[in-house]
């Protein structure tokens, strides 16, 4: 599948590198790939380089948009407050603050800061300051260069996790939430208050300490350090990191407000990637940080001289590709309609060409139907006439010489016979034996004809069809 934009997040997590890839298309963001480079510090560098290259090659990923996340323990995080009046000169004020925090001239730091959300009516300005020792960050950059990776941005993994959480909450996480990033040796706790990171701390897990006890202790410490008001409550605890699903099942009975970060993620993804949502949360947040134009917590520890600033013309290929993809989608949407219209026009043309033949066939059919009606009428007439002739011929053969027929009437094959005979009672059996007559019955009583001296008879019968 072609994506309009891709970003790869690489988190340094202990001795491992966790790599997540995020792509975007017209329907939204897609979690496209996840990988783990285990024990990357102790293995041979060419072997690790090939494994990283194979991951990028297999999933068709570029290396121009990679966000690196360093461990929380490598960074110094401070929450600073200043009078609102220094807002216009905030950069210079932060620079003075960093110089005061550096222990010596030799211990230089890379740093970045992010103003936190505050009410415009507040007189104090709250700022999140993140510092990392120059020697530590240079060592990470050297390793990345050996692996063929040049990060476009560097931040702290916990800041990326906060970005992921706020994005999944549509940036409107009103209230107070605690994020717990579970690690093999402990947990990092972050408190997000009204959409701003106001507290973060790493804690080791002592032997014999349950996860429920450790998380409850860190929750209480976070509440105490941030001085929540009497009416403020923690809305929920969100777990991410190694084995988050198992820890969630363990602590759910004691902390019912506990949820999984993986359950909040709404990206499209394959089934195999969904199984890695827990451990991939921070690296996925790194990829999201490099994907969006304005992340909720915008921090970049990459030295200024190594940052790549794209000129406006550098976006031309992306725009052209986007227009090409949009054109293809519009073409696919209209192709069926155009094809159907062309087919309809062709059918209309063929129907018009065949219309004279169709008209001739219809005329012949109408003439044939008229002839059929005439034939049926004539056959009916012939059938009735022939039947009367046959019946009269049959009667001439059946009736004895002393019998005379005065009236013969055939109405819809109901025959009336009237006449005189010396023995009319003997006529009924003779008529019944005829193959042309049936149901012969006498109608009325017989009486003597005064002129001939014979008996008058009146019979009804049905003709055999």
Image (cartoon, rainbow, N blue to C red):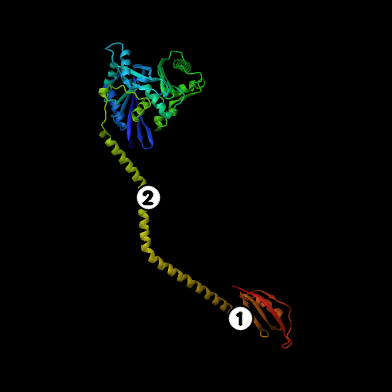
Q: Position of residue 121 (x, y in %)?
A: 42, 23
* CA–CA distance in space, label 1 to label 2: 76 Å
Instruction: State the residue in front, 110 or 380.
Output: 110
| Residue 91 visible | yes
Residue 267 appears left or right of 91: right
Instruction: Report the number of numbered marks.
Output: 2
Quadrant hosting residue 206: top left
Q: Secondary structure at mark 1?
A: helix
Instruction: State the residue in front, 58 or 161.
Output: 161
Instruction: State the residue in front, 100 or 63.
Output: 100
Give the residue pinned by disc 2: 337
Which disc, if any, is residue 392? Answer: 1
Q: Quadrant of the N terminus?
A: top left
Q: Residues within 10 Å of mark 2 (few under 14, many from 20)?
A: few
Answer above or below: position of 346 versus 113: below
Q: Quadrant of the C terminus?
A: bottom right
Instruction: State the residue in front, 295 or 168.
Output: 295
Residue 208 appears left or right of 385: left
């Amino acid at each position: 599948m072609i994506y309009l934009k891709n970003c790869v997040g690489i988190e340094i997590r202990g001795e491992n590198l966790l790599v997540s890839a995020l792509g975007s298309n017209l329907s939204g963001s897609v979690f496209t790939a996840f990988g783990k480079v285990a024990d990357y510090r102790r293995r041979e560098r060419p072997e690790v380089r090939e494994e990283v290259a194979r991951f990028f090659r297999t999933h068709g990923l570029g290396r121009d948009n990679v966000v690196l996340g360093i461990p929380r323990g490598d960074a110094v995080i401070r929450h600073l407050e200043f009078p609102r009046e220094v807002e216009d000169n905030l950069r210079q004020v932060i620079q003075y603050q960093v110089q005061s925090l550096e222990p010596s001239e030799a211990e230089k730091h890379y740093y970045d800061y992010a103003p936190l959300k505050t009410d415009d009516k507040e007189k104090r300005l709250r700022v999140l300051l993140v510092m990392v020792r120059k020697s530590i960050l240079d060592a990470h950059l050297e390793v990345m260069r050996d692996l063929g990776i040049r990060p476009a941005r560097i931040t702290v993994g916990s800041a990326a996790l906060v970005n992921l959480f706020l994005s999944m909450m549509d940036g409107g996480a009103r209230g107070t939430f605690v994020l717990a990033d579970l690690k093999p040796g402990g947990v990092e706790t972050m408190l997000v208050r009204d959409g701003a990171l106001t507290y973060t701390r790493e804690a080791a897990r002592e032997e014999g300490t349950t996860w429920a006890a450790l998380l409850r202790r860190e929750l209480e410490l976070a509440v105490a350090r941030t001085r929540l008001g009497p009416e403020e409550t923690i809305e929920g605890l969100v777990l991410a990191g190694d084995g988050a699903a198992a820890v969630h099942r363990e602590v759910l009975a004691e902390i019912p407000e506990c949820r999984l970060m993986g359950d909040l993620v709404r990206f499209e993804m394959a089934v195999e990637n969904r199984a890695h949502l827990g451990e991939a949360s921070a690296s996925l947040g790194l990829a999201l940080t490099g994907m969006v134009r304005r992340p909720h917590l915008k921090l970049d520890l990459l030295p200024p001289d190594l940052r790549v600033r794209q000129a406006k013309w550098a976006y031309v290929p992306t725009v052209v590709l986007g227009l090409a993809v949009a054109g293809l989608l519009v073409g696919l949407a209209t192709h069926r309609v155009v094809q159907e219209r062309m087919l309809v026009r062709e059918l209309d043309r063929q129907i018009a060409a065949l219309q004279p033949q169709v008209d001739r066939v219809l005329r012949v059919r109408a003439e044939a139907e008229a002839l059929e009606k005439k034939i049926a009428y004539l056959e009916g007439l012939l059938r009735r006439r022939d039947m009367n002739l046959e019946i009269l011929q049959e009667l001439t053969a059946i009736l004895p010489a002393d019998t005379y027929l005065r009236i013969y009437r055939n109405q819809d094959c109901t025959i009336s016979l009237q006449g005189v005979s010396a023995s009319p009672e003997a006529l009924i059996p003779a008529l019944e034996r005829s193959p042309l007559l049936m149901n012969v019955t006498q109608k009325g009583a017989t009486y003597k004809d005064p002129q001939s001296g014979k008996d008058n008879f009146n019979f009804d019968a049905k003709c055999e069809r």
